[in-house]
Image: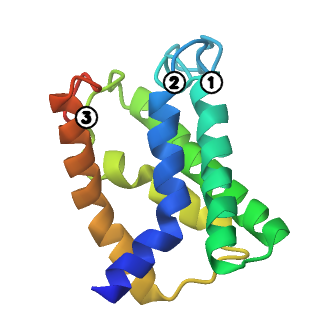
Amino acid sequence: MNEIVSAIWVILPAYIANMTACMFGGGKPLDLNRNFLDGRRLIGDGVTIRGTVAGVFFGSLTYILKSFLYAYSVPFSLELGFLLGSGAVLGDLVESFFKRRIKLKQGAPLPLLDQLDFVFGALILSRPILKLNIQKILIIILITPILHFSTNYIGYKLKLKEVPW
């Protein structure tokens, strides 16, 4: 149980970035309505400038707040928080790009990738300074879909989300 809590604690800035990007999203799409070579949108309306900025900001802020609890170096915390938050947003953006390429509409489910895109992005982008062992990475990958499905379903029931995934 301690390993699960520790894994969640490490990846928390990515979770916060992913959640706040959705909460504060809306407005201009990040792709500015541009199309790719295939004639379809680059990313779509689901990834917005406001949501992207909010996700990176709150992901970074989460790690800074963690630094006060555990006396981490603030510059290190800002850097790692930025990488985790940016990675989470980038992971979602890359998934949206590929969903458009395979002709999935915005909001259409792509099981497991929908739940793990932001985690993969965060882990990859933070890898240069966040050295996690394989056990912690596997715990993060295994626990994230459960947490993601649970929180999204609650958001759907509270009418905060249009779909339960």
Locate residue 154: give its quadrant: top left
Tags 2 and 3 in contact by the CB under 8 Å rule? no
Task: Compare marks 3 and 1 and give the one earlier in the sequence.
Answer: 1
- Contact flag, marks 1 and 2 (Cβ < 8 Å): yes
How far apart marks 1 and 2 lie (CA) works out to: 6 Å
Question: What's under tag 1, amino acid-wise?
Answer: Arg
Judged left or right of residue 161, residue 48 is right
Q: Eyeballing the image, is 121 above or below 24?
A: below
Q: Identify the amino acid type marked 3.
A: Gly
Give residue 1's position: percent from left, percent from top: 27, 85
Left or right: where 47 falls relative to 112: right
First in residue order: circle 1 vs circle 2: 2
Q: Residues within 10 Å of mark 2 (few under 14, many from 20)?
A: many
Residue 20 at x, y = what percent? Answer: 50, 38
User: Which residue is labeled 3 in the image?
Assistant: 155
Residue matched to label 2: 25
Tag 3 secondary structure: helix
In the picture of the structure, the residue carrying the numbered disc 1 is: 50
Return the x and y of residue 106 as percentages of the image width and height: 36, 22
Chosen colour scheme: rainbow
Query: What residue do we see at 28% from left, 26% from top?
Result: 161
Quarter placement of the C terminus: top left
Element at label 2 = loop
Q: Earlier in the sequence, mark 2 or mark 3?
A: 2
